[in-house]
Image (cartoon, rainbow, N blue to C red):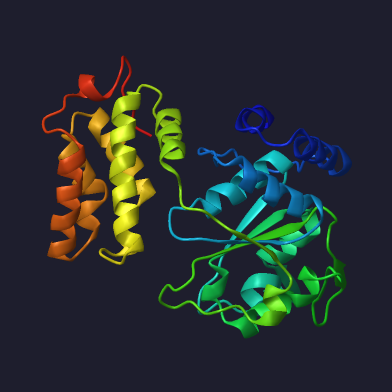
Amino acid sequence: MFQFLQEEGVSPQIIQGIKDFRATHGLGDDDRIPKPRYKYFGPRIWEQAAAALLCGQNLLLVGQKASGKNVLAENLAAVFGRPIWDISCHVNTDADSLIGTDTFRNGEVQFRPGPVYHCASTGGFGVLDEINMAKNEALAVLHALLDFRRVIDVPGYQRLTMHPATRFIATMNQGYAGTRDLNEALASRFVVIMMPEIASDALVRLLTREYPSLKVSFAADLARVFMDIQRKTSSSEISSRLLDLRGLLDSVQLMGFGIDPWIALDMGITNKSSDEFERSLLQDIIRGRIPQGLTVDAIFGDNTPSAS
């Protein structure tokens, strides 16, 4: 990861700060420390996020779909050497699902810790995914944990002081169905990064890193398709469900097994829409960028993608 940060052009001061953090707190001896499959490309965002965590702050990543919020959160946990807890927020999220609850064990009532409690006690990184899907009153239980007090008071049990290496990273999309604005009390406990949409050159790098045998010229064609979809989504001509980076990567793997590129992209992206007009519009985009009848040899070099 450090070599990757150097290649990205991340500030040497930031890289040294992360190394000092790891030396101070050690590496979490835990299989929860991620080994990211994907890398986040963007030195300025890397520097902002890492600086916030080095300052002991909690981080809120705000951006549209496919902007790399969860990829960046996983990358941060990996480079800082901390175990990660992924905490999916939704309308039924409550204090018990975050902190923990009573359970009956060995003939007595005991406390069963939740993911936030585990994360706070072990020095992990807690990723509060789609934090604005949860009700604000459910998240109020985190206030003392996220501000200068850095404690959890569990009624009937001991008070937990948060491990000094613990950080919380929240992610959110704005304007999605079922979401709401964070209240001032919660929002004030985070520093915020507005995540940019993925750039064309970064997408080419992602595709060729994931599939090293993919020809750069074809990766550039795929990137142009994705940029077209991104523009159509931004102008509300098509729904955001079609801005599917995972679907694009899945399509490339299908092409490696001989599936025609048009069909593979339909399987990975287009067919996820139930609207016939959207599907037709997206097929026009694909057919305008990708030549018909490309063979595997025209897309890949000597080695094609294998089954994952």
Q: Tell me the residue at 29%/53% (across/down).
A: 229
Task: Please identify the residue farthest to the top as the structure is shown.
Answer: 302
Q: Position of residue 49 (x, y in %)?
A: 68, 51
Q: Is residue 240 left or right of residue 166?
A: left
Quarter assignment of residue 184: bottom right
Foreground residue among 92 and 279:
279
For the N terminus, the image quarter is top right
Q: Position of residue 177 (x, y in %)?
A: 40, 76
Q: Tell me the residue at 40%/34% (across/down).
A: 204
Q: Position of residue 41 (x, y in %)?
A: 54, 40
For the C terminus, the image quarter is top left
Task: Please identify the residue farthest to the bottom as the structure is shown.
Answer: 137
Q: Is residue 73 above or below residue 10?
A: below
Q: Is residue 109 left or right of residue 90?
A: right
Residue 28 in sight from this viewpoint: yes
Total labels drawn: 0
Q: Is residue 202 left or right of residue 163?
A: left
Residue 242 in sight from this viewpoint: no
Foreground residue among 171 and 46:
46
Q: Is residue 100 left or right of residue 254?
A: right
Quarter assignment of residue 256: top left
Q: Tell me the residue at 34%/54% (across/down).
A: 230
Q: Position of residue 175 (x, y in %)?
A: 44, 74
Quarter assignment of residue 100: bottom right
